[in-house]
């Protein structure tokens, strides 16, 4: 269990931060960028939830996802090593990916078919969910960048989770837009 008695430690004043393993890395390190971006996505989801409180089923899905985003951050903050760990590291598992897929299918079953690309907007909830989607895509890009670095690995389930999360947020944004009927559609070349 996490216990934080003191918020400031001064250990990051030199521009470094610690991983779960105790290893110190610069704050601009790709691994720090990856889990920092997941934290940004989680905060964006939290803002979106201000507009979904009256949508119990969706809000419960988003709350579970926020918790899973902390799991994802912990996964990314605990690099795999050749040394046996002192404890079982927290990793995203396929069941979390499967649950997001099931949530996507639940929401998508109610949606009008897509007729064009959807512009971010419509209701306030949809706009915030679209913003959370784009922030999530950024986190996914940081994760892929991290995985491309020599000596770095990422849990494949973690990457799948991030990919599905942005899909979920897209479907959720359409769902809150009157199940797609209030989507703002892109009209190619409209303003030429």
Image (spheres, helix red, strand yellow):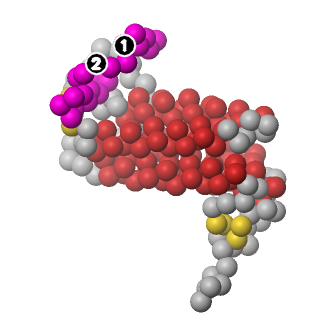
Q: Position of residue 151 (x, y in %)?
A: 21, 42
* Residue designated by label 2: 9
Does 184 sit left or right of 66 as displayed? right
Q: Element at badge 2?
A: loop
Q: Position of residue 187 (x, y in %)?
A: 67, 79
Q: Position of residue 23 (x, y in %)?
A: 21, 26
Q: Main secondary structure of the magenta part?
A: loop
The correct choice, above or below, for 177 with respect to 158 in the image is: below
* Residue designated by label 1: 6
- Whether pointer 2 and pointer 1 mark residues with C-beta atoms closer than 8 Å, the reply is yes
Residue at 52% from the left image edge and 38% from the top image edge: 42
Residue at the left extreme, as displayed? 14
The quadrant of the rendering that contains the C terminus is bottom right
Tell me where the magenta segment starts and ends, as one range.
Answer: 1-21
Does 178 sit left or right of 154 as displayed? right
The correct choice, above or below, for 33 with respect to 1 in the image is: below
Q: Nearer the viewer, residue 134 or 31?
A: 134
Cα distance in 3D space between marks 2 and 1: 7 Å
Residue at 64% from the left image edge and 66% from the top image edge: 119
């Amino acid at each position: 269990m996490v216990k934080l008695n003191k918020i400031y430690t001064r250990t990051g004043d030199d521009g470094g931060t610690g991983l779960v393993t105790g290893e110190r890395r610069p704050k601009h390190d790709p691994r720090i960028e990856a889990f920092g971006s997941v934290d940004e996505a989680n905060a964006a989801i939290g803002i979106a939830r201000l507009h979904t409180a009256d949508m119990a089923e969706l809000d419960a899905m988003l709350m579970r996802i926020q918790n899973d985003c902390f799991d994802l951050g912990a996964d990314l903050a605990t690099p795999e090593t050749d040394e046996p760990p002192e404890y079982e590291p927290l990793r995203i598992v396929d069941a979390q990916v499967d649950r997001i897929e099931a949530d996507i299918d639940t929401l998508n079953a109610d949606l009008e078919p897509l007729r064009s690309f959807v512009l971010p907007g419509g209701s306030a909830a949809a706009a915030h969910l679209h913003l959370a989607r784009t922030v999530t895509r950024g986190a996914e890009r940081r994760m892929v960048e991290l995985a491309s670095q020599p000596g770095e690995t990422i849990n494949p389930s973690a990457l799948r989770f991030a990919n599905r999360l942005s899909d979920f947020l897209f479907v959720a944004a359409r769902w809150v837009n009157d199940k797609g009927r209030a989507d703002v559609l892109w009209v190619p070349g409209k303003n030429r």
